[in-house]
Amino acid sequence: MSASSKKKLRKEENAARMTEKQKREQKEAKQLKIYTRVFAIIMVVVLVVGIGVLVKDPIERAVIRNSHAITVGEHKISAADLNYFYMDAISKHQEDVYNQYGQSFGDYWTIMLGFEPSKPLNEQNYDTKTGKTWATYFAETAVKNAREMYSLYIEANAKGYKIPADEQADVDAYLESLDLYAAYSGLNSANEYLRMTYGSSANYDDYSRYYNICTLAASYLDKYSADLEYKPEDYRAYEKDKFDDYTSFSLAHYTIRMNSYLGEGTKDENGNAVYSEADKAAAREALKADLETILGQEIKDKASFDKAIQSLTINQTDKDGKPIVDSKKPTATEIKDAFLEDIVIHADALEWIKETNRVPGEIKAFDVYTYAEHEDPEHEHDDDCGCARTTDGYTIVLFNERNENKVNLVNVRHILVKFEGGTKGEDGNTVYSEVEKETAKTAAEKLLQQWKDGKANEDSFAELANKESDDQGGKVTNGGLYEDVFPGQMVENFENWCFAEGRQAGDTGIVETEYGYHVMYYVSADEMTYRDLLIEVDLRNEDTEKWRDALIEKTPYEEVDLSRLDYGIVLNRSH
């Protein structure tokens, strides 16, 4: 496997190899690319939600189209052109909400979007302290993204960069599909569809130019990022002051709170439970007693930790005070590999976990507290604010393992034989019978034997995968090959086979997963470790962002007149 092919594959699969923190950071770094695709990505949301804009007469449309909003380099950008960025900024906000909450908008629309969709955006505050409206916020975002796109577009043209043929084909296909989207929306043309979405000054020719400019800019940014090359010493230098950012920690944690020990209390006139200071003091004493009991037990692993948690007083009775006889008692959080920034527990616990002298089986409790009410409603409490606080619970943490992620990535091929048949369960999942599973296993064994009876090398395995695998990705592309597989990427049994101790090039086997049976072929261990891959993602994003920001800064920019933007846009669900 050549260095260039590895780099290309890593670029394509980076998004699947990151912690949540790194995904968020890369999302920021690739913001430009997102904006060029956002219209297509959230098409279904637009169709359901609709974006309504004020209808302007032909003269007003012409004024907007011929206005001069900003200048980037030698490009004079009209309010009509800038409005594409403005509307996509709004759409991006909708997309973020959609990704976070799914389709459950309902009565929570205002809370989730942050603004009331039936009122003009220039009449609603984005920031109550400064008085900035949502319209201003989206306008600022539009200007920022227009500057970025045009700066990259200018640089790409100066370097003679052209969009790759496959990317251009995608752009052309998308633009040609706008008439179809229009028809699906009950409209007569792409122009009508674009005016409904981007405002009355929008038209197909201007939007096509906008979309092509954005695509070229994003493609050039991607190429710059992909062409960056790093050496092992670059990784070591980058991690020097943040070593544990790329270290995983296996642990379990469980939180117990005073409220669980309060009991029924006294009912007020409205039927609400009221607790006296004596009630609260008794609850805290019971809480401490349970904590001391847990810490006094011999706990070495998750099983003993779960047993200790189950022995808590609050876990011995149900909500009606009756003893729990069912074996499914509350247990600790599953022990898992987690990067520090992904562990949602007390900051002090994070510091304790990452101490290098931690040994498996250590356990410690950390206070969970509340602050007293502050007279200043804008005051934000933190560990250093000096405000009075009351302990109302404890997070108990069991340290299991420190993993610096220095395992090498691996390259494997597989042939998937899917289970056939099955029965839909009440939960909607398909359940396969033992007979159905055995049929798939037999087919997998025959394929492995067929390979052994032939040339029995990697090339012949790839040929067989292309012909027989039910994995469409492997069947259509590259002989069932997965390059640079990292821990946590694949389903458990598949991964366990790949990273089994002593695994050698040319090893074969059969593995069962939820998808069926996999005929496995181990190609090799990669030269790159999982740790270096994680570092490279951050390093590449950081260097790309620095270069992009410097490019934007050096590109001449002038803000002329933003008054023609559709500041008063109203979003609604009536379209």
Image (spheres, rainbow, N blue to C red):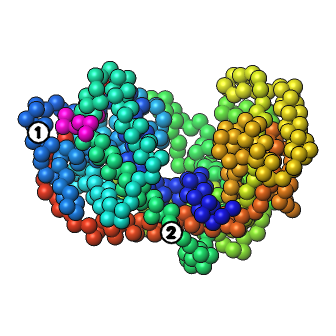
Q: Which quarter of the image is occupied by the C terminus?
A: top left
| Residue positioned 67% across, 26% down in the render | 427
Q: Which quadrant holds residue 395?
A: bottom right
Assign a secondary structure to mark 2: loop
Q: Which mark is residue 62?
A: 1
At a point 32% along the width and 58% down the height, the residue shown is: 153
* Nearer to us in this view, 203 or 46: 203
Q: In this image, 7 relative to 529: left or right?
A: left
Q: Are marks 1 and 2 in contact (CB under 8 Å)?
A: no
* Side of 96 relative to 344 (left or right): left
Extreme residue in the left direction:
59
- Where is residue 397 drawn, in percent x and y? 68, 59
In this picture, is 229 found above or below 447?
below
Residue 513 visible somewhere in the drawing: no
Q: CA distance from mark 1 to mark 2?
A: 45 Å
**SS of the residue under disc 1:** helix
Picture quarter containing residue 245?
bottom right
Kindly identify the amino acid type of the residue bearing the numbered disc 2.
Leu
Three-letter residue code for mark 1: Ala
Residues drawn in magenta:
196-205
Front residue of 248 and 529? 529
When asked about the image quadrant of residue 551, the answer is bottom left
